Image (spheres, rainbow, N blue to C red):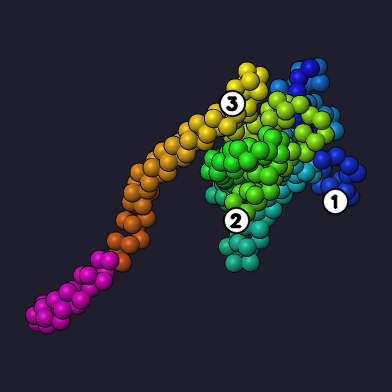
Amino acid sequence: MSEQLPSLDAGRTPAWQRLIEPLARLAAPPPEDPSKPSAPGVENDPGLLVPPAHRERFVHAGLRSRSAPVVFYAAKVLLALGLPLMVWWGMALAAKPISGAQGAALLLSVSLLGLQLPGLWLRRRIERRQRELFEAFPDAIDLIIVCMEAGLGLDAALERAAHDMELRSPALAEELALLGAERQLGVARAQALRHLAQRTGVEEIRAFATLLVHTERLGTGVTDALRVHAQALRQQRERRAEEAAARLPVKLLFPLIFTLFPALMVVLMGPALISLMRQFGPLVAG
């Protein structure tokens, strides 16, 4: 039996969600074939608006509410229809009516922009959350090692790390708390760790889950393996920081050319040009 990713929260559908769900279905991806086997880690739920493969994006972004896909796809439809109407209304108030091919192209471009804005926001949220999880994960491993060396078991160390990481990374603290809640509900440790990797979508956390599963299966020392893994994550974090620092001059080049350099030239060359105009201006006029 394939392992299932914890589903979005179920319950009674609110009235506002029932109102916007027809709009959301206009932009939602087509439903998958019920006879088709689901992907590993997700389950086919006919009550959900989006297929399991698309639902993982919302889980990676930390949006576990059942209404999150409905709001997301309804926002795509509303922006695709509302932004062109706002542009048309603004042009009409400015006494510049939109007509012809240029007007149609403008409205179509604004509509496509509104259709893509929620996807860009969701992608940015996923990237920001996964970067936060990656940067804070070595510190969480250090806390787990310290707790285990102090005499706590692995499950208790994970719960203590979840409590102590709330200020450093609320997202990682939430994921570790969910891991501890699954363990308290009787879920096997290997399955709970795989759920953690599936919820986050971070490759380093997936490697951490695989490491714990293998150490438990082979009976090797957990703290030594975690210490080596934490050191490797720190080195990888340092390499990413160095790569970002190396790309910084290239990213600053065009803003400097188009913003700072013109102002700098005006400040440096302005007084000299004014002096030349005062001295040679009468000669040229004469």
Q: Tag 2 or tag 3, which sits nearer the N-term?
A: 2
The x, y position of residue 273, in whole percent, is 18, 73
Image disc number at residue 221 = 3
Quarter holding residue 95: bottom right
Q: Main secondary structure of the magenta part?
A: helix
The x, y position of residue 194, in whole percent, is 68, 28
Q: Nearer the viewer, residue 23 or 218?
A: 218
Q: Secondary structure at mark 2?
A: loop
Residue position for label 2: 98
- What is the distance, in whole Å, between disc 2 and disc 1 at their CAs? 35 Å
Q: Secondary structure at mark 3?
A: loop
Quarter holding residue 122: top right
Q: Residue at x 41, y 38 (%)?
A: 239
Q: Residue furthest front?
A: 151
Badge nearest the viewer, 3 or 2: 3
Q: Secondary structure at mark 1?
A: helix
Residue stretch rendered in magenta on the structure:
264-286
Q: Amino acid at mark 1?
A: Trp
- What is the distance, in whole Å, between disc 3 and disc 2 at their CAs? 71 Å
Instruction: Establish if 280 lies above or below 172.
Output: below
**Residues at badges 2 and 1 in contact (C-beta under 8 Å)?**
no
- Is 1 included in the stretch rendered in magenta? no
Can residue 124 be seen here? no
Residue position for label 1: 16
Q: Nearer the viewer, residue 60 or 107?
A: 60
Q: Nearer the viewer, residue 286 or 5?
A: 5
- What is the distance, in whole Å, between disc 3 and disc 1 at their CAs? 53 Å
Q: Residue at x 60, y 61 (%)?
A: 91
Q: Tag 1 or tag 2, which sits nearer the N-term?
A: 1
